[in-house]
Amino acid sequence: MALAVAERVSYTYPGAAAPALRDVSVSLSPGQVTLILGRSGSGKSTLLRAFAGLIPHFHGGLFSGRVEAGGLDTRRHGPAALAGKVATLFQDPEDQVVFTRVLNEVAFGLENVGTPPQEIEARATGALAAVGAEHLADRLVTELSGGELQRICLAATLALEPQLLLLDEPTSQLDPLAAEALVDLAVVLARERGTAVLLSEQRPALPLELCDRVLFLEEGSLVFDGPVADARTWLEERHPAFVSAGSDVGVHPDHQGEVVARLDDVSFGYEDNLLVLDGVGLQLRRGEVVALVGPNGSGKTTLAKLAAGLLEQLSGSVERVGRATYLSQDPGRYVFRERADEEVAVGVGGDLAAAGTALAAVGLAGYEDRHPRDLSSGERERLALAAVLAPEPDLLILDEPTRGVDPERKHELARLLAADSSRATLVVTHDVAFAATVADRIVSLAQDRELAGV
Amino acid sequence: MKPVPAAVLLFALAAAALLAQHTVSVAALAAVLLAVCLRAPGKRRWPYLVGALGSAAALFIVTPFVERLPGVVYWTGPTIPVVGTLDVTSTELSGALFNACRLAAVSLAFAAYALWLDHDRLVQAAGFARRSVLAVALATRLVPALERDAAGLVEALRGRGVEPEGLRGRARLVSPLLAGSLERSLNLAEAMEARGFGRVGGTRMEQPPWGMLDRVAAAGAVLAVVVGALWL
């Protein structure tokens, strides 16, 4: 018997010209792990929100059809009533944290659904243990890394012991090991507790190994719904980027170009007695694309900022030739102007022609007069990329440029980066498949801050 | 000390500063609260101290020019339409100092609340008006969140080779900061609703009972208000 059902669901966000979901029908069974795939903006998050009751209750808009989760019809029962039966883990952990202390954060949902007071602490602690974070119980959430915070948010959803677990790109900020642990945990929940898991992902390789069923959305319509073996065949024919393990786009010549940035024996710490980097060296040559990988908290972003000149090293030397630009992890930071072309032109002294060229390069031609905040998350990511490409830098540094970006768009990004040999490019990423696709050289920053070239 | 008696004590000190009639008393209360705030970590305390002491200083400077009270005239300036002749008298100065100390004491009490109290436990301990207490706790976190956002926006500009310098450069940050905080608040509201916030029949994690220090603080709070009203 189905645990959750969506019947002929169509939905349009307030003010949107086109529907985000079109006549979607899905049923989810207990103990089943279902993976939703699709390009950015195809309606994956919207479908998850429909099962959580957030659509239409929180977002408004035009809704038709029927969604039932845990025996409750979402037209009559809002998200608060569904909480407990349904739990949602959103993409960005920083936007879902209510409390400042970890244990209280995990206990928040339990308190809301009326768990007996004497049980709350034990269940919250148990959920933290399930994600391997019991040692963080008394820590402040502001002290945690993005990966740790995502585990805390997962613990907060697990503590509710939901019948339906909705995971919206939960591994986007996690390193491969942490991502694997999270997906494994979701599978264990499904197998052992009978939880129905609905997972949306943009790094599909691992979930495709472990899930039972795949849904594929295109422009709000469900175009594939079937078991994972059939899904692989279907994806290989229609959307190969979703199943290829990183097809190489680089030429990989033996790069002997000019050294654009050289970091020698560099050390850095945000606090006096705790070094994030200790005696690290890195060299970047014109024409090469270097991927910097490593676990959460290993200092990748710090090293990238040092290379870009955004941080000053405590010791060692950093030398750069020409101009460096740095793409922040958060595309929401590229919103200073009210038009996309003006935003991109900020870094080129207001040169709108250069901005237009950069927008076209990232596939945003025709978006010049759009407000940056009106763009979808994937479009914002591309706008931010255009903003750092427009100055035609000698050193381009991209910090997690594939967060929330679908596999097909990642492939386009890889081609774009590989096509220009006039600069050195450093890509900080957790996305191993993307690193393999784009990089001439992969540099691994281990937890002990030593660099290993691959 | 638990957060509820600590919050009550800080509220009482702020109330005492508002009730007291002598500048020296109010200044002493402000000094005590300043000492409490100065014990907080430097990085966290500066926005609160700049806000509290800056607004008190601004009040002290502006008040003599907009008040018209008798006394020894120290300075006479031009006549401004509506406001009249600008002057600074001894009475205006002492009144300005008194009000500046009051504002400083109240602001520093809030700063101490924001810097030192465990807002989570305050919300957990709230036996009534829990939603309001949570709203205050979330609003309190706005200052450090805005600070982080501003640093991120500056970094995004510097990453494009643009240094936001001077007042005009910093003013560029205001609009994205405001819009960003609105966007975040919407995302947070969505996440809270998905986690059952607002549902009838909520419970609270068990809280440890009050100790001797907590009881002393609560009694001290009552005493501070009474003394402030009657003798300070």
Image (cartoon, rainbow, N blue to C red):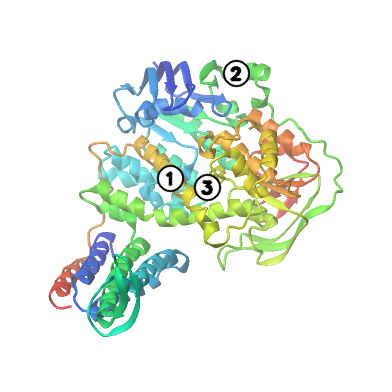
Q: Is residue A29 left or right of residue B220?
A: right
Whether residue A21 is situated above or below residue A302 in the rendered picture: above
- Residue drawn at 26 percent across, 85 percent down: B72
Q: Amino acid at mark 3?
A: Gly
Neighbour tally class for label 1: few under 14, some 14-19, many 20 plus, Cα within 10 Å: many
Give the residue furthest to the left.
Answer: B230
On the image, the x and y values in percent for residue A429 come to 65, 43
Cα separation between marks 1 and 2? 34 Å
Q: Amino acid at mark 1?
A: Leu
Q: Earlier in the sequence, mark 1 or mark 2?
A: 1
- The answer to which image quadrant residue B122 occupies is bottom left
Q: Chain of mark 2?
A: A
User: Element under label 1?
Assistant: helix
Whether residues under marks 1 and 2 lie with C-beta atoms below 8 angstroms apart, the answer is: no
- Residue drawn at 30 percent across, 49 percent down: B134
> Closer to the camera: disc 3 or disc 2?
3
- Residue A138 bears which disc, if any? none
- The answer to which image quadrant residue A7 occupies is top left
Foreground of the two, A366 or A261: A366
Q: Earlier in the sequence, mark 3 or mark 1?
A: 1
Residue topped by disc 1: A128
Foreground of the two, A232 or B6: B6
Can residue A74 be seen here?
A: yes
Foreground of the two, A426 or A184: A426
Q: Is residue B104 left or right of residue B165?
A: left
